[in-house]
Image (spheres, coloured by chain):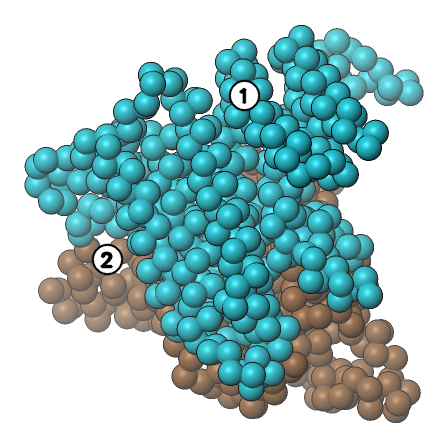
Amino acid sequence: MIQVPLSVGVVAVSALAVAMFPRSVLVFLLFQGSLLFVYRARIPERLRWSLLAAALLVLMPVIGYFNSYYLEVATQVGIFVALALGLNIVVGLAGLLDLGYVAFFAVGAYSWAIFGSPHANIILGGGFPLAGWWFYVFLLVGLAVAATTGILLGLPVLRLHGDYLAIVTLGFGEVIRVLANNLDKPINFTNGPKGITPISRPPTPFGLPYGEYFYFLALLIVVAVVIVNRRLEDSHIGRAWEAIREDEVAARAMGVPLVRMKLMAFACGASFAGVMGVLFSAKQVFINPESFTFLESIGVLAMVILGGMGSIPGAVVGATVVTVLNLQVLKGFSLWLNELKNAGVTVLGYSLADLPTQFEPAKYERMVFGVILVLMMIFRPQGIFPARRRQRELGG
Amino acid sequence: MDVELLIGIFPQVLLDGIILGFMYALIALGYTMVYGVLEFINFAHSEIFIVGAFVGVEVMLGLKSVGLLEGLPWPVVLILVLLAGMAGSGLLAVAVERVAYRPLRNAPRLIPLISAIGIWRNAFNLVYPTLDVLNLRFELTETMDVSVKSLVVIVGALLMLWALHLIVNRTKVGTAIRAVAEDQAAASLMGIDVNRIISLTFLIGGAMGGAAGVLFGVQYGLINPYSGFIPGLKAFTAAVLGGIGNIPGAMVGGLVLGLLEAFAASYLSLLTGGAFGAEYKDILAFSLLILILIFRPKGLLGEVVRERA
């Protein structure tokens, strides 16, 4: 029971530390670590959830009030958590390796971008942009459009396995990007590489600033996605997915409807990405095809793999770690290195100022994804937080 | 529509298609050989291909700095560059296999695949620290006549394909490679060192990719680290089109795809009055891939693909 005061203490201390050093990356990492500690600690469930809720609902916005960049990071984390959870359904539960996942994110983002900006006037005549409250309707529209796209992709590739499926989904992701880049003629749907702007934002309730508003909205969607995921995992659908993952022939013999289940996996995974796409386009105000490259798909995959395929807490932690690594740790390290360089510090007689100028950790994003994938596969293929069922299989 | 123009550009488009096709064929060989032996798609191959081009350029720059670029006759320089590119790519391929694939040989199928994706587009960082401003030019061939360049590419590709054919079909090593592809366990019972043969397959496939990289540089003059991505995907499509695991299939598939793309790139915008530009050739290639996989998954020349549990 020592863990009860410990958990409360850790959260309190990290909150205090953040209040005192609002600009320190290390302290912000400490705050995130404390959340993880609370999640893993052996304390009563009610205390655990109230601590987490307090941290996410109260502390985080307060931190964001002092340093809005952290709020931006937290919102990004929320977006990627939802993406990772969606991909987790397709890759982790159903075992269908999808390398073009970001395409669904793009479809969601473009659906609001086109109708939420004056751009739609070019296609449909006048009357656009739609009023801000349509944004909420489009959260559902984005979901539906992405799910439909998922089914459309799923239909032709149903018969493919492993490697073939991977390469076809990858081709599909590229096709969506090429379309986004080139559909500015004959009819201008996407405005090509120039992208679409300005995209309307919804009116915020209680006069919340937009930073806080999008943070809360992302959090709300993430919570909804987690609940849906949990319910799915233990339902007959989730079990059917896992049966397909383990052995397709046996699953079919047991009466699992392969076609329907696979399509459902694609549609579910895609729909989460679609919703987040709508949020993303409103948050950014501007989108262009550059945001939806292959690297993003690999990044989301790295998050799922790092956390553990098929594991919900794994996807959440994986998304958080990778996003924070990209947005803060690598960037922070670059800045720090530059400061050292400018100060003319020497390490073991080697002046840091002599380091080649191209050497900049922030540019190693792709490499980080790659190294994560390879190392995890070799040393811990089940991920940081293995799925319960998988844990039983591999640990037993 | 200007029929004369359509006919007028035909020979040039045909030539472009053939060159592109040979390029795809060389890259596709890397995919197909590895697939034949391990039944696994080496996603990192597109990276290995473009590293070959970069090694070639570096050697060229090295020769230039010691004043040999002008001193030697250009065919000699070209051969040196080609050999360097092949060696670089071949060794990189072997290293990748050693580090990222061999420890996972017996793991479930998804696992080496993900490891391969991790290597893909990252192996490059090991050779060059950053990628942002890296555009290198093939100075050797900048002044060369276009027809000479085309000839170099076609002859080079044909030589490579012929050499590969000899190695695989006429030598002892080639027999061993085919034996391992057929049945690993039986091959090892016959005294073949399977690990060595797999390394060798990666070496040969990688070297073919490296040669393709150098020829790519010769033909297009400018390379950057991202140039490998799309040709790699296309070459994979070519390998599947011809029947993956099948060496003549890779060549046929490469040529078909190259021709198709060249014609799409030049005629699509002419025929649709500019509504659909050359960019749609990528979409065409991927649609083709999906269609083949649905209707003829074994490819044009392929054997029946066994289902592996």
Q: Which residue is mark 2?
A: B276
Toward the viewer: B92 or B9?
B92
**Chain letter of the residue beneath label 1 in the structure image:** A
Query: Who's the residue at 29% across and 28% down the image?
Result: A201
User: Residue flagged by tag 1: what amino acid is it?
Assistant: Val
> Which mark, residue A58?
1
Measured along the vertical axis of the image, is residue B307 above or below residue A196?
A: below
Q: Are marks 2 and 1 on the same chain?
A: no
Residue at 71% across / 70% down in the picture? Answer: B108
**Residue at x-position 82% and y-position 66%:** A396
Up-down relation of residue A183 to residue A194 (above or below): below
The reply to whether residue B150 is in sight is: no
Q: What is the crowding at mark 2: few (fewer than 14 residues within 10 Å), some, or many (at least 20)?
A: some
Q: What colour has chain A? A: cyan
Q: Is residue B71 left or right of residue A348?
A: left
> In the image, is residue A207 above or below residue A1?
above
Q: Disc 1 on helix, strand or loop?
A: helix
Chain B colour as displayed: brown
Q: Is residue A258 visible?
A: yes
Q: Quadrant of the C terminus of chain B?
A: bottom right
Q: Amino acid at mark 2?
A: Phe
> Who's the residue at 66% across and 77% down the image?
B39
Question: Residue B224, how many percent across, how many down?
Answer: 55, 45
Task: Find the distance from the CA under tag 2 to the CA under tag 1.
Answer: 52 Å
User: Left or right: A130 with respect to B278?
Assistant: left
State the image coordinates of residue B201 (x, y, percent, origin top left).
74, 73
The number of callouts visible is 2
Q: Which structural element holds mark 2? A: loop
Label 2 marks a residue whose chain is: B
Task: Tell me where residue B294 appears, x and y as whole percent.
Answer: 42, 80
Viewer-closest of B203 and A313: A313
> What x and y, as percent, mark residue A181?
33, 47
